[in-house]
Image (cartoon, rainbow, N blue to C red):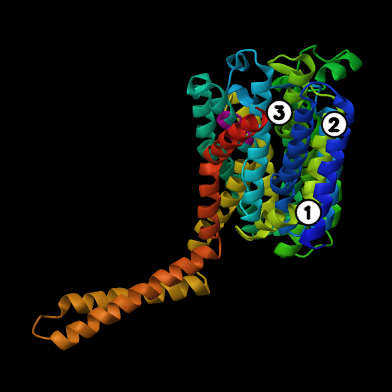
Amino acid sequence: MNNSLKILIGAGFAVAVAFFANSIIGQATHGGFLVLAAVFGAYMAMNIGANDVANNVGPAVGSGALSIGGAIIIASIFEASGALIAGGDVVGTIKKGIIDPTAFGGDPMTFVYAMSAALLAAALWLNLATWLKAPVSTTHSIVGGVLGGGIAAGGFAIVSWSTMGKIAASWVISPVLGGVIAASFLYIIKSQILYKEDKLTATKKIVPILVALMVAAFMTYLTLKGLKKVWPIIVDTFSFLPHTKKPTLMVALLFGAIGAGITYLIVKPKIAQRVSTMSESRASINMLFTIPLIFAAALLSFAHGANDVANAVGPLAAVNDALTNLAVSKKAAIPLWVMVVGGLGISIGLALFGPRLIKTVGSEITELDQMRAFSIMMAAAITVVIASQLGLPVSSTHIAVGAIFGVGFLREWLDSKETNEKQLKLQSEITKQRTLKAELDACTNEEPAKKLSLIQAHKSQKKKVKSLKRSLRENYVKRGMVKKIVAAWVITVPAAAILSALIFFFIKGFAV
């Protein structure tokens, strides 16, 4: 499918949303702004699908566990399901509490301008990031949009800078946590299976435990992040559960433990049967992680749809609430049509434009196989659970990409300890460089021709060693991609904020 047709389909979805919003609002005062916000919301949802969802399925695709087509089908179904089934019916009108709604002075139209500007700015930034093949945080994009629109509407005083400080801290917290946890799991796999003399016996023992741990992590994650909006309905249905507003950590861990125990009992004999017909090759062992990766991609997509759809529909729901009630509220009901716009828009954006970022996350940062992808998926679930319990604001995008970095750097470190052809060549060239340096130091000023020749030879050898080191490092983690992605993370909030402020003044000027 060519780009023109993709753009046409995306535009068609936005137009359909605009017509529906117009039919809902009718001839109400300022009704055109709901139509405008609905178009921006549809555009934002498609960009979330194009950029953010790659983190859920990219590792599975990069490892070969899923094809791009299969990943898009699975993610589209589970993203939309998460949004519609567990997306909730109420959302905070100001994402992450970075701005106090009362600061708008009770003027609903100023609030509408600010939220509309936030939506469009965040969507434009995500669109640019996707085009640049940089996976960025959609949460941070909408935070930047709300920040810029809010400052343009009410000045710097209305911003909660302490909250913004926590969000900025997540730029470091998220990737570091994700990287450390992913590297830890990969090291366990390598040390407990691949480095053992009897790999098959080790595989039979360790793989069922790892799969059970994955189930525990994902059931805990899904309970905390994917079911929190519909938890009151669940506890009313199952009266033996504690009647709390949202699932507690203990309940989530209990669900995870039960799921892990059942999984272990089912998986252990199947793995034993499979191992009895396997070779000790890495490829054969890798295949055991394929099915867990497919389930992980589906569950991550469901939880993402349930949890992050608010990035697309939150400001749209806020605009709808402000125009309907002619007031600014801290909480807004999410009409079903708004949730459908979010869920369907994410799926359409993923199908049309997702492959670009899926390829980047899956194969253009570091080379992945099923073991490495498994470690990344585990890190994604566990990091979110830990961070949410510690009250740390983290980004699922930063976690996933940080986990990929961690896996790549661990591979680089482990291989640097081994003696292989490339390492031997590097050591040989380093020895030559040291020999030339020693000869240069021993050369006297009475031998100018020889000294000049040695200086030139040493410089040339030094460049050769640097080039070899760079080449070896690039085989593990593409440094250029790391720099580009980190730069995009750092400028996401300010870029979206500046765009939002400019759009706010344009909308306000146009309205007046």
Instruction: For mark 1, give the secondary structure.
Output: helix
Please name the residue shown 59% across and 32% down the image.
505
Instruction: For mark 2, give the secondary structure.
Output: helix
Residues at circles 2 and 1 in contact by the CB criterion of under 8 Å:
no
Query: What's the amino acid at mark 3?
Result: Pro
Residue 268 visible here: no
Q: Which mark is residue 7?
A: 1
Query: What's the amino acid at mark 1?
Result: Ile
Q: Is residue 348 left or right of residue 181?
A: right
Q: Note whether 133 is above or below 319 in the view shown.
A: below
Where is the C terminus found, in terms of image quarters? top right
Q: Going from the N terminus, do you reach mark 2 or mark 1 first?
A: 1
Q: Residues within 10 Å of mark 1 (few under 14, many from 20)?
A: few
**Where in the figure is residue 507, as x and y percent of width and height?**
65, 33
Residue corresponding to mark 3? 315
Q: Going from the N terminus, do you reach mark 1 or mark 3 first?
A: 1
Q: Is residue 380 left or right of residue 156?
A: right
**Where in the figure is residue 422, as x and y percent of width and height?**
50, 73
Please name the residue shown 78% across and 54% down the image.
7
> Front-most of 427 and 297?
297
Residues shaded magenta: 142-148
Q: Which mark is residue 21?
A: 2
